[in-house]
Amino acid sequence: MNRDVLESRIMSEQIFGSSRKIQFIGLSKPPLAPAQQQKDQMSIESLLTFSHPRQSQTASTNDITIDNLLTCDVKEPTRKRAKKTSKMTCYYGAVAQKSYGSEKRFLCPPPLVQVHHSTRNLLLSMSILCEDQGLLEQRAILDENQRGSFRYLHVTGTAKAKQFKLQLNLLQPEDESPLATFLTKPITIISKPSKKIGKTARGTTSCISTEAPVSLFSRINSQTVRTKYMTSVGSKLCAKHSIWSPFDILLLRQPQPTVLTTTKKTSKRYNTARLQFSTPASAAHLMYGSEIILRESHTGVSSAPLMVCKVDRGRIVPDACGPVSQMQKVALRLLDTTEKLYLSCPSIDDQTWLDSRPSTLSENGEQVDDALCWTMVGIHVLEDHFDEPPARPYPVVTCMDYQPNTHTLELFGHNLHPSVQPWLGTHGPLNTRLMQPNHWSIALPPLEQLVGELPLLMVRQDGLVYHTGKTFSTNSCT
């Protein structure tokens, strides 16, 4: 029997919360001849714009749900509660030095974590994952700028491990349960900065890239406690102990390749002289003699044009060539002056602003002290998003009973979870014993300390305070 009414048929569907979201709806008539099927075939656009007799007029054509199809009197479509998405960015060094014996060479610069668009004061945990090293973990809290750093992570001296990874855990402040976990790229372990020019693909990985940010720090007398990292405050460059910033390298000019002629062995029969071209291993590598500008990645504060100079044993190496290696000391010569001035880190602890000073001339050439030397390290960036769970429900106290025999306060209510701590006015946190679910027994301070009416408060670990609406008075205890 032919019918003129179209029949709807759900082709596929996907679970979305409590409703089912239809991905494709086929509308078909009873079987027709092949020629007529081609004529009456409908496109997806026509299916979605088709006005179903049971569909709410306010429903979006791109969000057709079963509820909309089965109810015609719904004025507004049911909307899902969107999850709050936050962003995490982690900056860490591309290489790290081994620690030998009792000497601990901490990761330099220390890994830095920045959390964006988060309303919760999350806890951070970072661990070193190395094949022949025990678990080394450090925890940190976010400051007022939602940043946290790990200053005491180090890699022990091993003969086998050539790389390691960092594992970052974001923890919920209430019960320190993991909210999200991230793994970094492999970090290369080195014993000391390489002085050889990378000629192979493996060797060039230890060179500074101009396409990735870098960190620069100055260390006076090789003392870790006197390490200052380049950063910016306001519109000026400075150096600080506690914080560092990644810098982008703006390449102004690369040095022209030169030709060096070397002879390894003399021979009367054969000419063993070889031509070596000091061409860069890659155009993306930073070369000695390059003219650059350092720009802070976050604020955009930039330096004056600088020339990268090689430093060896406290002396400027003239006409140095080749790529700059990781953890290599360099001097940054200012190009806007006729005098040879170099970017200087303040050697006095309470001074932070960067300055410029000349080198010292001697028989061996230009001598530079530690304040004119900067160690350069390539930086990797780990960036990802994570969903924040909804906040725990508010604790509700329905009944409060004082027990004079034990001098305790019995609380009954809902959502009394261990992540909150009770306070009576300024007294707290108070010792709590869980008797039953949503039944607490609170040990009270001496009565002479409980003066007047004291509000009963619930304080979460991240500092959020709930007012229960209950008060405690010593008059009710006598």
Image (cartoon, rainbow, N blue to C red):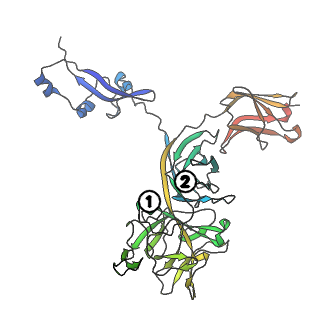
| Of callouts 2 and 1, the N-terminal one | 2
Q: CA distance from mark 2 to mark 1?
A: 31 Å
Of circles 2 and 1, the one toward us is 1
Q: Is residue 319 above or below residue 16?
A: below
Quarter of the picture containing the C terminus is: top right
Q: Give the residue number, with chain letter if any, for mark 1.
A: 202
Give coordinates of residue 81: x percent, y percent: 47, 35
Farthest residue to the bottom: give it: 363
Is 84 positioned to the left or the right of 149 in the image?
left
Q: Give the residue number, with chain letter if any, for mark 2.
A: 114
Residue 392 lies in what quarter of the image?
top right
Let me know if residue 119 appears in the view. no
Q: Is residue 449 above or below residue 280?
A: above
Residue at 36% x, 82% y is 268
Is 361 positioned to the left or the right of 409 in the image?
left
Instruction: Name the amino acid type tagged 1.
Output: Arg
Q: Depth check: 193 or 142 in front?
A: 193
Residue at 60% x, 76% y is 371
